[in-house]
Image: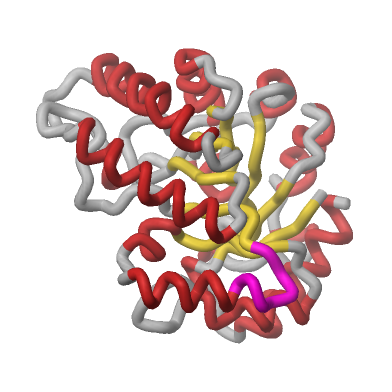
């Protein structure tokens, strides 16, 4: 598996992209970085080109992007703005493609949260329609969209891997698949067996963090759920990318320990 690191949670600069850590992560031996596209989209063109050049000049690639839609954009409910979303995606896919990304993660909890009183079934269909229309836009740049189930504290729709698979199946597009995030899976107490039974052909990306404090992992014994999760990925014959998406205090030390853990236990 290829091991990467999401930079959104370790970002320290005002732009919140985390690009200041690219050199460190490359030096530690990470295979790629995962940059937050909503924060990338907030940059003016000159600032974006500077970051794109920074990535190009580094010894590490941006193979994935997360944080797809900004919190201000409505994707479900009576105020969902389909045209605005489509316009945004065209620009976002272009920037992600320019960075070299092959995956864009569709978590975006605030954007897709279902308003109180609005039927969840209708919201599900809104998301399916949106993803169906986004598929060819992403395909122009060779990008696959990865639906990310989120814990209930962050969103009230698509909370489990099984629900993510149902949405992917409803869209039925070759480049609309599913992500599993160990932190969120643990938060909703979902059985990792769902990964083993549904993952093959659907699972396209993985996020990982120690549930306690959402920190970088360091030891196989620190969480009883690690082994069943890793075994479920193996049962699904998953051999793709796994990104650590976690907070850190001493980023150098914790990122180094996290990478050693991932190399030892994820292969």
Q: Magenta includes 58?
A: yes
How many discs appear? 0
Quarter residue 186 falls in: top right
Does residue 97 appear in this view?
yes
Q: Position of residue 4 (x, y in %)?
A: 69, 60
What residue is drawn where x is 83% and y is 51%? 266
Residue 124 horizontal side relative to residue 151, left or right: left
Residue 30 horizontal side relative to residue 86, left or right: right
Q: Position of residue 132 (x, y in %)?
A: 41, 22
Tell me if residue 118 comes above or below residue 24 in the rendering. Answer: above
Quarter residue 5 falls in: bottom right
Quarter residue 111 falls in: top left
Q: Position of residue 123 (x, y in %)?
A: 26, 23
Which region shows up in magenta? Answer: 55-61
Does residue 245 appear in this view?
no
Q: Magenta includes 113?
A: no
What residue is drawn where x is 60% and y is 86%? 250
Of residues 9 and 87, the one drawn nearer to the viewer in this rendering: 87
What residue is drawn where x is 53% and y is 76%? 19
Of residues 227 and 256, the one drawn nearer to the viewer in this rendering: 256
């Amino acid at each position: 598996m290829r091991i990467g690191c999401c930079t959104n949670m370790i970002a320290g600069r005002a732009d919140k992209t985390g690009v200041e850590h690219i050199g460190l992560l490359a030096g530690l031996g990470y295979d790629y970085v995962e940059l937050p596209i909503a924060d990338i989209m907030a940059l003016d063109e000159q600032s974006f080109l500077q970051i794109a050049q920074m990535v190009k000049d580094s010894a590490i690639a941006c193979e994935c992007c997360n944080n797809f839609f900004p919190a201000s954009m409505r994707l479900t409910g009576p105020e969902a703005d389909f045209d605005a979303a489509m316009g945004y995606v065209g620009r976002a896919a272009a920037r992600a493609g320019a960075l070299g990304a092959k995956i864009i993660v569709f978590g975006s909890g605030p954007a897709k949260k279902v308003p109180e009183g609005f039927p969840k079934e209708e919201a599900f269909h809104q998301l399916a329609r949106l993803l169906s229309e986004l598929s060819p836009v992403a395909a122009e740049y060779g990008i696959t969209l990865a639906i990310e189930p989120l814990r209930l504290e962050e969103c009230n729709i698509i909370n489990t891997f099984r629900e993510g698979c149902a949405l992917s199946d409803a869209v039925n597009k070759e480049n609309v698949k599913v992500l599993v995030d160990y932190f969120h899976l643990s938060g909703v107490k979902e059985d990792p067996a769902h990964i083993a039974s549904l993952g093959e052909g659907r699972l396209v990306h993985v996020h990982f963090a120690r549930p306690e404090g959402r920190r970088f992992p360091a030891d196989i014994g620190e969480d009883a759920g690690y082994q069943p999760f890793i075994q479920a990925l193996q049962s699904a014959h998953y051999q793709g990318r796994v990104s650590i998406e976690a907070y850190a205090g001493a980023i150098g030390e914790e990122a180094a320990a996290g990478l050693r853990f991932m190399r030892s236990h994820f292969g």
